[in-house]
Image (cartoon, grey):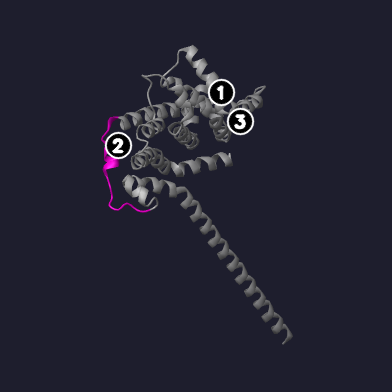
Amino acid sequence: MATAVKDDVKKRRSSQSRARTRLGGDSSIYVTIFVALIAVGLTLGPILFLGLGGFRTNGQIAEDPTGLPNPWVWQNYWDILTGSTFWEFTLNSAIISIATTAGVVLFGTMAAYPLARYSFRGREGVFLMFTAGLMFPLTVAIFPLFLLLQDLGLGGMWGLIIPQIAFALPVTVIIMRPFLAALPDELEEASFMDGLTRVGFFFRMVLPLARPGMVTVGVLAFLGSWNAYLLPLVMLTGRDAPTTLPLGVTQFQGQNAANFAGIMAYTFLAMIPALVFFLMMEKRIVDGLSGAVKG
């Protein structure tokens, strides 16, 4: 009889413990969802505000700054999309971003390869120099860099692409090094036995196997170049210098200071390419960073 009572008490305590655990888990889920919704609202709120503001008139914005368009006005977007400057600036940004991305991926992977696979004196010191590059502020280097490029005769797009590649290399090397170090030594030995040189092994084996990491650094380089403002502002000087889309937004704001609805429409359109590109590649970025952490 006493044993049955003890078993009953144990069952009740176990049941209560499971209920408390389940309640605690449910509470944490609700808190997580609440925090995630706040983060999503803070992230998407300004974007939606810009997008909806472009469908309004200046009078609507002045009367009710946070209201919905009533009626919906398409003229702001139509004027921008049918103009030539917006597409010209978009093309310039696309060319500069693609060239920067190609250079960052190629040179970053080539720099990370010996730091990951070769053993030589000073290897960690070289890697430390790349790591220290993360702490080098752009604002300090930008004017000496501008004078240097002027002396070298590098201007226009190349005067912007080369510094952007250089400033993106530290992050690229830090991400790619674990990827390349995780490649099995047996694969390298088998390739050498088949007659491949180190250069051949790099191009025929390393590049295909390191594709997830290369995609990650490529996406980061593309977004960084597309959204860059300070470096293009200083480097792209002169009457014939190309204008990127971020600089075009500032130029449009200066020419249409009283047209708030038009400025909001222009800014929203300038954000769309980078936003769409990031959403398309978001999963690959996470996969690539996960691989870097595991490596």
Q: Give the residue type that dot 2 points to.
A: Ile
Neighbor class of circle 2 (other Cα within 10 Å; few <14, some 14-19, many 20+) is: some
Q: Is residue 183 visible?
A: no
Question: How far, Cα to Cα, is label 1 from label 3?
Answer: 12 Å
Q: Which residue is mark 1?
A: 141
Q: Sequence-wise, which precedes: disc 1 or disc 2? A: 2
Q: Residue at x 28, y 47 (%)?
A: 73
Q: Residue at x 40, y 48 (%)?
A: 49
Q: Determine whether 272 is above or below 160 in the image.
A: below
Which of the image's four quarters has the N terminus? bottom right
Q: Sequence-wise, which precedes: disc 1 or disc 3? A: 3
Q: Residue at x 43, y 41 (%)?
A: 278
Q: Which residue is mark 2?
A: 80
Q: Nearer the viewer, residue 194 or 289?
A: 289
Neighbor class of circle 1 (other Cα within 10 Å; few <14, some 14-19, many 20+) is: few
Q: Is residue 150 visible?
A: yes
Q: Nearer the viewer, residue 248 or 98?
A: 248
The part of the image, by quadrant, that contains residue 270 is top left
Name the element at disc 3.
helix
Q: Nearer the viewer, residue 166 or 295?
A: 166
Q: Sequence-wise, which precedes: disc 3 or disc 2? A: 2
Name the element at disc 1.
helix
Which of the image's four quarters has the C terminus? top right
Q: Nearer the viewer, mark 1 or mark 2?
A: 2
Q: Determine whether 33 is above or below 53 in the image.
A: below
Residue 26, given in percent of the width and then of the height, sits at: 55, 65
Q: Which residue is mark 3?
A: 135
Q: Which mark identifies residue 53?
A: none
Q: Where are the magenta residues, as a range?
A: 67-84
Q: Nearer the viewer, mark 1 or mark 3?
A: 1
